[in-house]
Amino acid sequence: MTLYQTLSKWADEQPDRPAYRYFGHCHSYGSLRKSVDITSGKLATLGVKSGDRVGLCLVNSPQMLHLLYALNRIGAVAVMISPKASKRELREQLTLTECRLLFCTELSAAAANSLDNVTVIKVPLFADLPIRFKFGCAGRIVKHGRLRGAVSLGSIAVSENIPPVSANDDADAAIIFSSGTSGECKAVVHTNKSMIASAIYCMQSEQPLPGDADMYAILPCYHAYGLIVSVNTPIMVGCCCRLMPFFHISTIVSQLRQKMPTFIPAVPTVFKRLVDNKRFCRLIDSGRLDTSRFRTGFVGGDVLPEGVKQAFDRLMRVGGGTGVLCPGYGMSECCPITVERDVSFDGSVGLPFDNNEVMVCGEGDDTPLPDGVSGEICVHSAGMMSRAFTADKTFTPAVFADGKMWLRTGDIGHMNNGRLYFERRMRRLIKVSGHTVFADAVEKVVGECDGVGKVIAVPVPHATRGSGVYLYFTGDADSRDVLDYCRRELMPYAVPVGISHIDQSDIPLTELGKIAYGVLEKAAAQNAG
């Protein structure tokens, strides 16, 4: 089955069941399918056909859902792009995926107005938003400008010649970008089959689902975890998706007070913000926030600190519930893979879900290593990508000696009694609020700034993001100019939280003449502190 066919199955079986909620507005599966079919007619008017790639530069919203499943209905591919993408990133991602049609709101006007040879369709932004969000969005539009010459989605006629429903479950369904920074832009392709498999095995251990089960979609739809788990999974298993377009802690706390969701997939920083929020804790301690509906917090994107898990689990018990945070492991190429439900949390990221196999191998080898021995984490999964590609290279899972397709993750870890323990990245990655930032990609972009010589990006601890990017640079550029350049050319979460000029002769080196990144990380932590 395809994503649309699965949605349609639920619309046939339980047309009145809530499919999604958006700031108090509830829409049933029957209503969702009707909206998707109407949107499919608009896509047909625009000439979209099976196999076309179409950019969705949108927040979590009803229009995003309608377009995602309408594209799937006719066999087109949704290319998920961050609304915060810079001009450079938007052009690069559209060029790489050969998109000639882009749906976006006026939040992306600054980047979208710079596009050539791309048809831009304006998607409504303010409908049903709370007043605080409307003011925030209006301020951004005033600062960055409006979309110029874009046709509004609402003004497009609905064609009567809608292509037949696509039924190819092996077909591409969505493309996600594995890095939010420019550099070697990598597009990860997921099929109908992989996205549905991810939803089924993720929720298999949660069966039977409560009749009013819902999932809180805080993570953005352009994030792999956000799209595959937060947005698509509830629709695939027939429960309700509660859409949240922006991360705003006060609004989130208010929504949780009204009705605690059954499931919350999120990165560790979301749960840390909640346990640190005085109002959230006060509401629970005073008995005004009932946590009895909450069952599982699926934690991915970064390592879950034990203190955050303990604090959140305690709050759930105080509020009358038994739900817990469950750390897990996954990536854009395969999300999710494991989850840890053992109450005696010891740093494991869990047992593989059904239809997932994990083994740890030596670098370049496909022979499993013994328990406790560190090596590269390799994954065989029903939810694995079909392929990924850059401008000049395609990546596919490798066939090992056992004849199965395995994904080399580029992560280091070890196994013990069937459980996976994540240790570190093989590549220089920095996790910022669950987003993956490639250090070398940041360096490449900043290296193009006038007056900048060598650039070194390292991770630094951050109070709310978990980690941030700290930048060292040589050359005669002014630090303020370099930081302004970063704000223009990088995603917000990749913008350095600290920056230092360094002389070439002061760059620390190892005995082998390589950059001693650990020394720079320690210095950055002291500078940032």
Image (spheres, grey):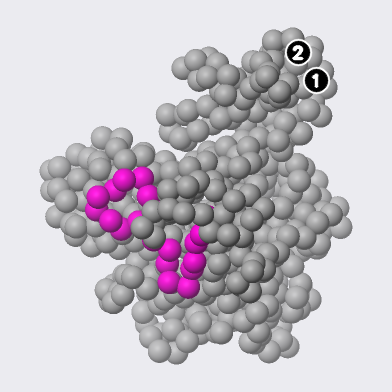
> Residue 20: in sight, yes or no?
no
Q: Which mark is residue 499?
A: none
Residue 381 picture location, percent across and down: 54, 69
x 45%, y 85%: residue: 11
> Residue 468: in sight, yes or no?
yes
Magenta stretch contains residue 350: yes
The secondary structure type at the circle numbered 2 is helix
Q: Earlier in the sequence, mark 2 or mark 1?
A: 1
Residues drawn in magenta: 339-360
Residue 523 picture location, percent across and down: 55, 16
Mainly helix, strand or loop, the magenta region? loop
x 58%, y 77%: residue: 193
Closest to the observer, 481 or 44: 481
Residue wearing tag 2: 504
Q: Is residue 504 left or right of residue 271?
A: right
Q: Is residue 278 above or below residue 239?
A: above
Q: Is residue 217 above or below residue 190?
A: above
- Please identify the quarter of the rendering in which residue 457 is found: top right
Closest to the observer, 475 or 363: 363
x 50%, y 46%: residue: 374
Q: Is residue 176 above or below residue 458?
A: below
Q: Is residue 494 above or below residue 82?
A: above
Q: Is residue 407 left or right of residue 135?
A: right
* 2 and 1 marks in contact (CB < 8 Å): yes
Quarter of the rendering occupied by the N terminus: bottom right
Foreground label between 2 and 1: 2
- What's under tag 1, amino acid-wise? Gly
